[in-house]
Image (cartoon, rainbow, N blue to C red):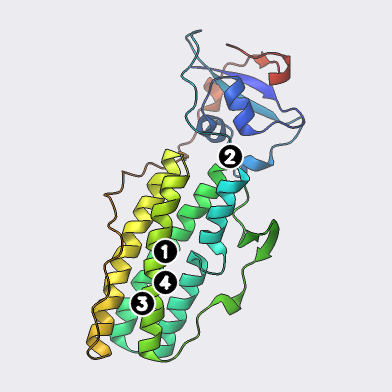
Amino acid sequence: MDYARYTVHAGDTIYKIAKAYNVEMAEIIQLNHLKHPDRIYAGQVLLLPVQESREPATPMQIPEPTLTYATWLYEAYAGKDSELTAITTYLYQAVLLDHPDFDALLRPIAYDEMQHLEKLALALRYLGVDPKYGALSSGHWVEWRANFVNYTSDLCALLDSNIADEARDHQEYLELAQKIPIPEIQCILMEMAADEERHYHLFCQAKQQYCGEFAPCPQPTPCSPPPIYTPIISQEPLQEAQLPMIDLPGPHQGGRG
């Protein structure tokens, strides 16, 4: 495959360039080793793959990144009731309780939540925004704060809170998977919903064991089997010496069909 040089113009985004030249956003990001694809600048030179066929490519099925999708994901990522809050809460509880049984329960769940945090960061990058810790509230950026952590010390109250949080997160991810029509992000959300359902049952079992008789936990909404997750960006090195170059006009000057 041949490659072409494209000079970024003011107002360009990876999405706009990809759409103008009928290529995938992920191809541009991978080819140019873009760690921050939302930060391209006027005058920057990017490499674009040139299709061998002159027939129009199949239009992308991914809509232009929107603030709405990012706002929803930021809240799950590092808002008040978020993955970042869950990680710090569960690690705090593991240290506070200082018991092998709870250490074995809480630390693996905290590790799962850490993986969720990374997946949401990738999803935010996929939307072209910076995955910094915080969330948008009424149009204003709110940094993540340590007082979001649940510092409850009573064991049964602590487990009740964890059960409620996992049930809420499970439902939230199912709903987001329905609302965000991007397959790569839907896949991430469905995987995370399945994890939260498993955490929910683990905390229910712990409460039954350590807090005496009580009504069984209600069942959360069933989670459909998650699709197989495919990484958005490949990290394979490129053979730059094998890239023949062609200069391209900007989208504003007319691209290829």
The foreground one among 212 and 55 is 212
* In-image side of 113 versus 139 (left or right): left
Mark carried by residue 106: 3
Task: Identify the secondary structure beneath mark 3.
Answer: helix
Instruction: Using the numbered discs, state the Cα–Cα distance from disc 2 to disc 3 in whole angstroms.
Output: 35 Å
In the rendered image, residue 209, in percent from the top left (x then y), is placed at 22, 86
Q: Residues within 10 Å of mark 1 (few under 14, many from 20)?
A: many
Amino acid at the residue labelled 3: Leu
> Is residue 111 at all visible to an observer of this figure?
no
Q: Which mark is residue 169?
A: 1
Name the mark on residue 65.
Answer: 2
Report the quarter where the C terminus lies. top right
Q: Check if mark 1's residue and mark 3's residue have beta carbons within 8 Å.
A: no
Secondary-structure class at tag 4 = helix
Tell me the SS state at disc 1.
helix
| Vertical arrangement, residue 143 with respect to residue 5, above or below | below
Residue designated by label 4: 165
Q: Is there a contact, CB below 8 Å, between mark 1 and mark 4? A: yes
Check disc 2: other Cα within 10 Å, few if <14, some if 14-19, many if 20+: some
Crowd rating for badge 3 (residues with CA inside 10 Å; few <14, some 14–19, many 20+): many
The kind of residue on which mark 4 rests is Asp
> Residue 13, located in which quarter of the rendered image?
top right
Three-letter amino acid code at the position of disc 1: Asp
Q: Earlier in the sequence, mark 2 or mark 1?
A: 2
Residue at the far top: name it. Answer: 54
* Mark toward the viewer: 2 or 3: 2
